[in-house]
Amino acid sequence: MKLLTLEGVSFNYGSQLPTVLQEIDLTIGAGQCHCVTGPTGSGKSSLLNLLAGVLNRPHEGDIWRSPRLVTGWVTQDPQTQLLRKTVGAELGFALENLGISTEKILFKVQLALRRAGLYLRLDTQLNTLSVGQTYRLMIAAQLVCEPHLLLLDEPWAQLDDHGVSELLVVLRNLLQEGMALVLVEHNPSAFAEIIQHHWQLEAGKLSEGIYTVSDAAQIEAPTWRNQPKFEHVGKVLINAEALEFGFDGCPVLFTCPQGFKLQAGEIVTLMGDNGSGKTSLLKSLAGVLNLKQRLPIKVLGRRPKLGVYGADLGLLMQRPSRQLFETSVLAEMQFSLTRFKLPKERAAQMLEELGLSGLSQLPPYKLSHGQQHLIALASIACLHPKVLLLDDPLAGMDKHYYDKAWYLLQCLSSQGCAILLSCHRGIEHSAVSRQLSLHNGLLVESFIEEG
């Protein structure tokens, strides 16, 4: 049964901006799984917006929807979809507004949680969930309304491997029940067993096939101009002794029996599953968390405290949109430079070196998730920090943007910056020297063998 059809649909966000989608043709039927791939910033999320019916700007072409079509949609940043404070209240919100009885709401909410692979108490506070858990919660929030079409934006980047396996079981069952799925993914191979139709979106055109990275000009090796060499390469910049970490009044989240250190000039990954405590550890190192517990940690020779490090410490969170607030990309890049009285020319130079000068006058909120991540990272890199803490910074990036991000990290590393980078999966890159693993409540260090 046909659910949704696009015929010759074109769309853009303004008369002075390039067309995002050009003469798109797409038909989605019940029980079908479509996957859309394409370069970062190509308009994949805009296509999902169009399919969900939430774009209020006019478009060209025809869009036909089944009269009784119910669509569910989970964005790249699921935090923007949260409305309530607890799991139960969040999942029951839409049903309450539909006038469903309390008994039926409770049954539907518990069923949706199980179908999404979440086993949480209904009174669980949303602010205690990881980004990956929140993503699955938003899937459950769509399932309570029993949609005919479910749209998922970059689920692989948000979930650990176990979460992806659980999601695959959920999606396979939904397809068998006749639900249609549209995935936007940079890593379609993770969902290859359920994908029936592959689409490539590039330069506004939608065509059948899987996106492959074309040859592009490579960024040259780090060549930051007129920067003094770091004088103390190898100096310990982060020193954590044996510790137990937990939120006030809550059980211990994880222990680190041997402690860990981070030296100038090295890049260390922090790998762990959703909800294991990676984000909490990074925030603790930056002094962002206000806990009664005094952790035996020193960063740049001081106990972590918000505001004491100035430009010497940078923290990039999982939600780059929360750290972007200026009216243009260039202004965003210059903001902290002005604040710390550093040369503003670094911003334009950085954009030029990254090949992103074409984005300089665009508002950051109009960028794709991957572009926002890179701009937020670049704005911190302009400060030349001594310590850089990154929370899953590579999400939503294709290979070209991934390479640009690693160019930045290697530039900073060559200057002596100590970098700690959290991730769901191991990262195979020659610049990574060591790995911290956070699993089953235990934080341990594991060295990466060369060769």
Image (spheres, grey):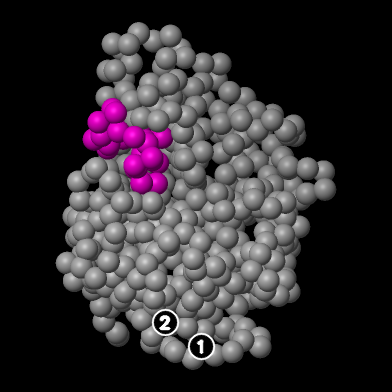
State the image coordinates of residue 40 (x, y, percent, origin top left).
58, 57
* Dominant SS in magenta: helix
Image position, residue 421 (x, y; %): 40, 66
Give the answer, above or below, for where 137 lies relative to 159: above
Q: Residue furthest right?
A: 16
Residue 369 screen position, x and y as percent: 55, 52
Magenta run includes residue 48: no
**Structural distance between the alpha carbons of marks 1 and 2:** 9 Å
Q: Residue at x 72, y 55 (%)?
A: 328
Along the viewing direction, whichever of 200 and 224 lies nearer the viewer: 224
Left of 334 or right of it: where is 428? left
Q: Residue at x 39, y 46 (%)?
A: 131
Q: Say above or below: 160 vs 225.
A: above
Q: In this figure, which residue is indicated by the disc labeled 1?
A: 230
- Secondary structure beneath dot 2 equals loop
The residue depicted at 61 percent of the width and 72 percent of the height is 382
Residue type, label 1 = Phe
Q: Which quarter of the rendering shows the C terminus? A: bottom left
Is there any visible trace of residue 213 in the rendered image? no
Q: Are marks 1 and 2 in contact (CB under 8 Å)?
A: yes
Report the residue marked by disc 2: 264
Mark 2, Cα crowd under 10 Å, few <14 / some 14-19 / many 20+, is many
Q: Is 60 situated above or below 259?
A: above
Judge left or right: residue 276 versus residue 33: left
If you read the primary sequence from the N terminus, does the residue marked by circle 1 or circle 2 appear first? 1
Q: Residues in magenta?
A: 113-142
Task: Using the image, tell me which numbered label, if any, was put on residue 97.
Answer: none
Image point (56%, 84%), residue name: 221
